[in-house]
Amino acid sequence: MPASQPGSCLVVGAGISGLLAARGLHDAGWRVTVVDKARGVGGRMATRRVGSGNFDHGAQFFTVRSERFAQLVEEWTAAGVVEEWSRGFAGPDGEPRADGHPRYRGTRGMTSAPKHLAHGLDVRTGERVVTVRHRQDGWEMACESGLRVSGTALVMTPPAPQALALVESGGYELPAEERRQLAKISYDPCLALMAVLDGPTGVPEPGGVQIKGEPLDWIGDNRRKGISETPGITVHAGPEWSRDHFDAPDDEVASSLLALAGDQLEADLSPRVVETSLARWRYSWVTGSHEEPFLAISEDHPLVFAGDAFGQPKVEGAALSGLAAAGHLLGRDV
Ligand SMILES: Cc1cc2nc3c(=O)[nH]c(=O)nc-3n(C[C@H](O)[C@H](O)[C@H](O)COP(=O)(O)OP(=O)(O)OC[C@H]3O[C@@H](n4cnc5c(N)ncnc54)[C@H](O)[C@@H]3O)c2cc1C
């Protein structure tokens, strides 16, 4: 177990796992720098402005199973950044499927909780890490912009294939067994369409149709959800459809997904579309994970891999993994 006196740490990724790892270390007196290539924080808890609409286009909601995560969600609720959305959504047939389990949303979109967590931390957004190097005194990462940051410990939270490529980019050699475990981690892709409409979307209360299948996985109404003044839908394609169309041109994907969503909602959406935007998530849902909540490469200068591929999946799993990574470096529970 690494020493518990305050050190310095680099965290790659300002998604929920990276921010919680950073928060835990920062609160224990560590010097922490978080770097993310995106314009804002949140990672796959993502909210985007399209025209006059506000869209959640990554995670749509989250659930709570563990006591530790319930505590966090209580704190976020008290801070006004998350709230219960519903206890179930409409199924593929449009009929309500309430099951009594709360689903949570960010109060201004899914990025609300990550923004809250980032407050007071040294978070550099818009900085893509291109090289990670292990040096005599710790770790150094170089960003596309020329920024260089160093620390004695390194926490990597991008999806595992990206994390692995980065760690090896500066010639660092991972132990064979750990490398094999990281290389086994896999994800499904997801094509996510956001469409601003000129009127109601046809998505029933409480604002989501959960299909969990092919060709569509989900249709969400961002106005019914309470995060957009303007009507707009988020359409998630299923993993198979997303894989088959991942490299197709935007307009082709958009018109196909609008037609499929229209069929699902029994409405002709295309004439009512004001504007669209497409997000391509190469790594969306974890399909093959690492059993433990983090993977640590033990040495003088710790390297810890964390995120939703470690332990449990989804927002809750990512959050718990971030806490576990910080706990490992601190030598105590966070
Ligand atoms: C379409 C979709 C729908 C989903 N729906 C749900 C849902 O309904 N409920 C649920 O619980 N979960 C859902 N999820 C999963 C959930 O969003 C994730 O499990 C969770 O947000 C992952 O958090 P993380 O911190 O592990 O990773 P991420 O949020 O992916 O954070 C990793 C960060 O690393 C950054 N990064 C990567 N490479 C670099 C680099 N070279 N330099 C700098 N930064 C870099 C990225 O920009 C990113 O911000 C969904 C995901 C997607 C994509």
Image (spheres, rainbow, N blue to C red):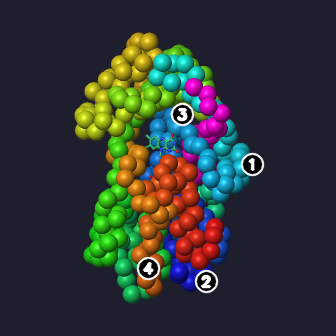
- Indicate the secondary structure of the residue bearing disc 3: strand
Decide if residue 104 is in sight here: yes
Q: 10 Å neighbourhood of mark 3: few (<14), some, or many (≥20)?
A: many
Q: Are marks 3 and 1 in contact (CB under 8 Å)?
A: no
Q: What residue is at 59 percent from the left and 43 percent from the top?
A: 63
Q: Amino acid at mark 1?
A: Ala
Say the numbered circle drawn on residue 58. Answer: none
Query: Would you name the residue on which mark 4 appears?
Result: 298
Picture quadrant where residue 80 is located: top right
Q: What residue is at 31 percent from the left and 69 percent from the top?
A: 179
Say the numbered circle drawn on residue 54. Answer: 3
Extent of the magenta region: 97-116
Picture quadrant where residue 96 is located: top right
Is residue 211 left or right of 248 when viewed as pictured? right
Is residue 256 placed above or below 17 in the rendered structure?
Answer: above
In which quadrant will I find the C terminus?
A: bottom right
Q: CA distance from mark 3 to mark 2?
A: 43 Å
- Indicate the secondary structure of the residue bearing disc 4: loop
Q: What residue is at 38 percent from the left and 48 percent from the top?
A: 287
Q: In the rendered structure, which disc, 4 or 3, sits on the residue that comes first in sequence?
A: 3
Q: CA distance from mark 4 to mark 3?
A: 43 Å
Q: CA distance from mark 4 to mark 1?
A: 37 Å
Q: Position of residue 160 (x, y in %)?
A: 37, 59
Say the numbered circle drawn on residue 78. Answer: 1
Please name which of the two marks, 4 or 1, marks the residue nearer to the observer: 4
Query: Would you name the residue on which mark 2 appears?
Result: 5
Please name which of the two marks, 3 or 1, marks the residue nearer to the observer: 1
Q: CA distance from mark 2 to mark 1?
A: 31 Å
Is residue 119 rendered magenta in the image? Answer: no
Q: Amino acid at mark 4?
A: Ser
